[in-house]
Image (spheres, rainbow, N blue to C red):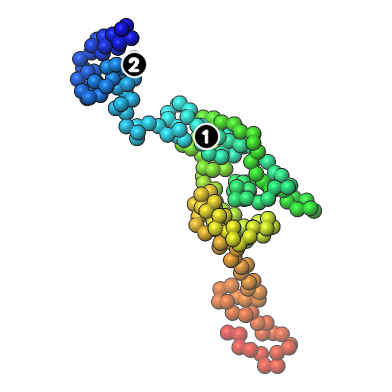
């Protein structure tokens, strides 16, 4: 009896100004609730008013915007340590870490693939960086979205790690998520190094001729 009476008395005791702004149907539903105000708030709050768990709201840290040194942002407020493993195969993430400035460790036996360890830490709030979620595989929201490596470098990476043609669409999809560029892996596989323009005039594209050379019987016109 007391359990039903207390919420009713609390609702009656609320200021008239509060009750006047509450929808009668919501008021009726919340009268039996133990927390009348909490019920009213839950019933009247729009989904768009609920802050995303992937953003930062003022000074309150929901996910953070900076990772510790040597860590890269992996999404959902989490940071993971960047490591290199000799036995690991190349991945879109590994190439993204190359684009982020991390260096692959190479020897006469080959290069170690960059990856993220299981060592996970929450991003912290840095007031000197923008109040937003960092881009994937960057260190903080102070950094811009990663830019892809040159197509020639990307083609070497794909070949070195034995990426098969049938898997290229998956790499295209992953690169689009990371870099925001469509068909990146496909373009890299079709990339051909431009030929060198040897002995050509850069301004006209014509072949340079030494008019004073003794090999010419009749000197060509050089004007």
Location of residue 210 with respect to 131 vertically, above or below: below
Q: Position of residue 8 (x, y in %)?
A: 26, 11
Determine the residue positioned at 66% across, 51% down.
Answer: 90
Q: Which mark is residue 41?
A: none
Is 54 in front, or is 129? 54
Separation of marks 2 and 1 at Cα, in angstroms:
32 Å
Q: Secondary structure at mark 1?
A: loop
Determine the residue positioned at 32% across, 23% down.
Answer: 41
Is 190 in front, or is 219? 190
Location of residue 73 with respect to 167 vertically, above or below: above
Q: Residues within 10 Å of mark 2 (few under 14, many from 20)?
A: few
Query: Quadrant of the rendered structure where residue 151 is?
Result: bottom right
Determine the residue positioned at 22% across, 24% down.
Answer: 25
Q: Position of residue 209 (x, y in %)?
A: 65, 82
Determine the residue positioned at 48% across, 37% down.
Answer: 133
Q: Which mark is residue 77?
A: 1
Instruction: Give the number of the mark in front: 2 or 1.
Output: 2
Q: The C terminus appears in which quarter of the rendering?
A: bottom right
Is 160 in front, or is 1? 1
Q: Which mark is residue 35?
A: 2
Q: Secondary structure at mark 2?
A: loop
Whether residue 115 can be seen here: yes
| Residue situated furthest top in the rendering | 2
Q: Is residue 99 left or right of residue 54?
A: right
Q: Position of residue 16 (x, y in %)?
A: 20, 15
């Amino acid at each position: 009896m007391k359990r039903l009476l207390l919420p009713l008395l609390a609702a009656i005791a609320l200021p008239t100004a509060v009750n006047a702004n509450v929808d009668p149907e919501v008021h009726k539903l919340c009268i039996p609730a133990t927390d009348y105000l909490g019920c009213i708030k839950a019933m009247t709050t729009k989904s768009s008013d609920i802050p995303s768990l992937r953003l930062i709201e003022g000074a309150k840290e929901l996910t953070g915007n900076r990772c510790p040194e040597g860590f890269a942002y992996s999404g959902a407020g989490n940071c993971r340590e960047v490591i290199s493993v000799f036995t690991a195969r190349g991945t879109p993430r590994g190439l993204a870490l190359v684009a982020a400035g991390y260096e692959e460790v190479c020897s006469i036996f080959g290069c170690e693939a960059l990856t993220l360890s299981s060592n996970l830490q929450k991003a912290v709030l840095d007031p000197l960086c923008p109040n937003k979620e960092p881009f994937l595989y960057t260190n903080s929201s102070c950094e811009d979205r990663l830019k892809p490596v040159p197509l020639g470098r990307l083609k070497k990476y794909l070949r070195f790690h034995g990426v098969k043609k049938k898997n290229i669409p998956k790499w295209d999809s992953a690169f689009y998520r990371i870099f925001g560029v469509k068909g990146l892996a496909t373009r890299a596989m079709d990339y051909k190094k431009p030929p060198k323009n040897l002995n050509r005039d850069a301004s006209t594209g014509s072949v340079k001729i030494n008019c004073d050379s003794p090999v010419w019987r009749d000197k060509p016109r050089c004007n």
